[in-house]
Image (tube, rainbow, N blue to C red):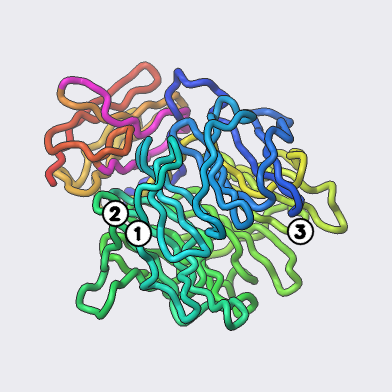
């Protein structure tokens, strides 16, 4: 039977863009001071100490800009041009004591900021820092009055916010339930996913204390740590079409410790940061389809690992070294598909904290097409399905030999609407989803659109119809 090979597809920025924007931006810290580093594509050494930042900071990339989220103690967003990482474009406050955790930019003049020590999601203009509005999240708080909203991901016209609900009066353990809060971008309002129940409902997670989110098609992969040491967490799947959790697919028992971080590199493969009872950190691969957990990656220091990232082909590990081996601190690079060690440690000045991939990375959705017609073993573009479509259309295609491949959507006048794939791809069969949005993340109008695949001197075109 035919089954599409599942891979991670790197949606590179336009070929005319400078190569520098394909690198890695890294926040670094010794927990007293903070700085930044940059690793260019294929470089063996990083540029370090580019810009002083807060000692507790994370980062986010969107459309040629880096957003540094300076957390508790500075409570602001620092905006950088990806082509000049030493000179800030803008810096704006998100409220004293707000403790921002994440930012999601949906348009040049609109972004959302989660504030861990507040009860509202901030809507802001990232161009000038002007506050546009706030979305009340207090209905999701536990007894201490705070919902502890941390990470944000986007699926179509909706945001999904991780709501931890930790009991600050009881040792910061998780309360009875944790949620994904769903927000309508157009209305700037919380969506009640169960109107039949009293109050405003989010998506109830099967475990508690979510600390990682990744979007794969219409599903969100969530890492949940529950209480530290209780082995009650793991990796679960949330279906955004039904707005419900499908339960844990990987348990902390199988992982052998607490899951403190996660990255998904394909629709079937992810990597988890695992902390055992001795607080020794490791990185282990897991299979989202079978729940199997693989052997830990080699050349990890056993010390603290704050984050993981992927640029599609590679897995990047932020290894802070250990007391016994401080020289092991730096970035470690692995093959994402198999976990083989490639390079490292790459010095980042201060030890690495958050890794920001300076480009868009799309995870190809898994298409288990039992009984479906196989694509020919050559360069080919399959028919999109469903067609006509409402929310998203799957576009299957095949690559016969390694080549630079571009897959794009155009209107009937031939004007580019969306670039779905632009990069070098290995031979294989793939499927990529288009959500009916253009390159600026705006929803396009109803009608017929052309899907064009080109690479290796060949091209193919098909049609899809959007009906909303």
Q: Main secondary structure of the magenta part?
A: strand
Q: Which residue is found at the position 28% from the left and 34% from the top?
A: 438
Residue 9 appears in view: no
- Name the residue carrying label 3: 303
Name which residue lies at 44% across and 59% down: 221
343 displayed left or right of 90: right
Tell me which residue sits at (84%, 51%) in the image. 326
Mark yes or no: residue 154 visible.
Answer: yes
Residue mark closest to the camera, 2 vs 3: 2
Which one is nearer the viewer's eye here, 291 or 174?
174
**Residues marked 1 and 3 touching at CB (< 8 Å):** no
Q: Who's the residue at 26% across and 29% down the image?
A: 417
- In this figure, which residue is indicated by the disc labeled 2? 188
- Distance of label 1 from label 3 (alpha carbons): 39 Å
* Closer to viewer: mark 1 or mark 3: 1
The tag on residue 432 is none
Classify 10 Å Cα crowding around label 3: few (below 14), some (14-19), many (20 and above): many
Q: Earlier in the sequence, mark 2 or mark 3?
A: 2
Disc 1 marks which residue? 135
Tag count in the figure?
3
Across and down, in percent, residue 276 comes to 70, 70
Contact, mark 2 vs mark 1 (Cβ under 8 Å): yes
Circle 3: element type: loop
Question: Where does the magenta region start and end?
Answer: 413-435
Q: CA distance from mark 2 to mark 1?
A: 7 Å
Q: What distance separates the C-alpha of mark 2 from that of mark 3?
A: 41 Å
Query: Is residue 418 part of the magenta span, yes or no?
Result: yes
x%, y% of residue 8? Answer: 46, 43
């Amino acid at each position: 039977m035919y089954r599409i090979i599942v891979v991670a597809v790197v949606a590179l920025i336009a070929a005319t863009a400078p190569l520098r924007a394909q690198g890695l931006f890294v926040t670094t810290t010794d927990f007293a001071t903070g700085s930044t580093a940059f690793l260019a594509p294929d470089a063996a050494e990083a540029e370090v100490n580019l810009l002083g930042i807060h000692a507790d900071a994370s980062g986010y990339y969107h459309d040629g800009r880096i957003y540094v989220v300076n957390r508790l103690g500075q409570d602001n967003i620092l905006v950088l041009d990806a082509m000049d990482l030493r000179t800030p474009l803008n810096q704006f406050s998100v409220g004293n004591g707000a403790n921002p955790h994440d930012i999601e930019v949906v348009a040049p003049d609109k972004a959302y900021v989660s504030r861990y020590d507040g009860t509202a999601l901030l809507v802001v203009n990232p161009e000038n820092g002007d506050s546009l509005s706030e979305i009340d999240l207090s209905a999701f708080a536990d007894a201490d009055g705070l919902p502890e909203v941390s990470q944000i991901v986007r699926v179509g016209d909706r945001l999904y916010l991780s709501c931890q609900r930790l009991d600050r009066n009881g040792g910061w353990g998780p309360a009875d339930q944790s949620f994904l809060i769903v927000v309508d971008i157009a209305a700037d309002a919380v969506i009640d996913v169960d109107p039949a129940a009293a109050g405003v409902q989010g998506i109830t997670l099967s475990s508690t204390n979510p600390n990682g989110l990744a979007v794969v098609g219409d599903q969100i992969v969530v890492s949940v740590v529950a209480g530290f040491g209780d082995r009650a967490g793991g990796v679960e799947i949330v279906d955004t079409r039904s707005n419900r959790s499908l339960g844990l697919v990987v348990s902390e028992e199988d992982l052998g410790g607490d899951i403190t971080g996660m990255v998904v590199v394909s629709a079937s493969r992810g990597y988890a940061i695992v902390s055992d009872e001795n607080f020794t950190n490791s990185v282990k691969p897991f299979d989202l389809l079978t729940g199997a957990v693989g052997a830990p990656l080699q050349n990890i220091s056993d010390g603290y690992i704050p984050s993981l990232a992927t640029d599609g082909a590679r897995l990047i590990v932020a290894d802070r070294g250990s007391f016994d081996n401080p020289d092991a601190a730096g970035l470690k690079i692995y093959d994402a598909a198999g976990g083989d060690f490639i390079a490292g440690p790459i010095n980042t000045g201060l030890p690495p904290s958050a890794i920001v991939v300076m480009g868009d990375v799309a995870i190809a959705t898994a298409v288990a097409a039992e009984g479906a017609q196989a694509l020919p073993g050559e360069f080919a573009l399959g028919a999109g399905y469903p067609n006509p479509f409402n929310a998203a259309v799957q576009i299957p295609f095949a690559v016969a030999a390694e080549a630079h491949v571009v897959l794009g959507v155009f209107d009937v006048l031939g004007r580019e609407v969306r670039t779905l794939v632009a990069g070098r791809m290995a031979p294989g069969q793939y499927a990529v989803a288009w959500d009916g949005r253009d390159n600026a993340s705006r929803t396009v109008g109803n009608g017929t659109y052309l899907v064009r695949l080109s690479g290796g001197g060949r091209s193919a075109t098909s049609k899809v119809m959007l009906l909303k």
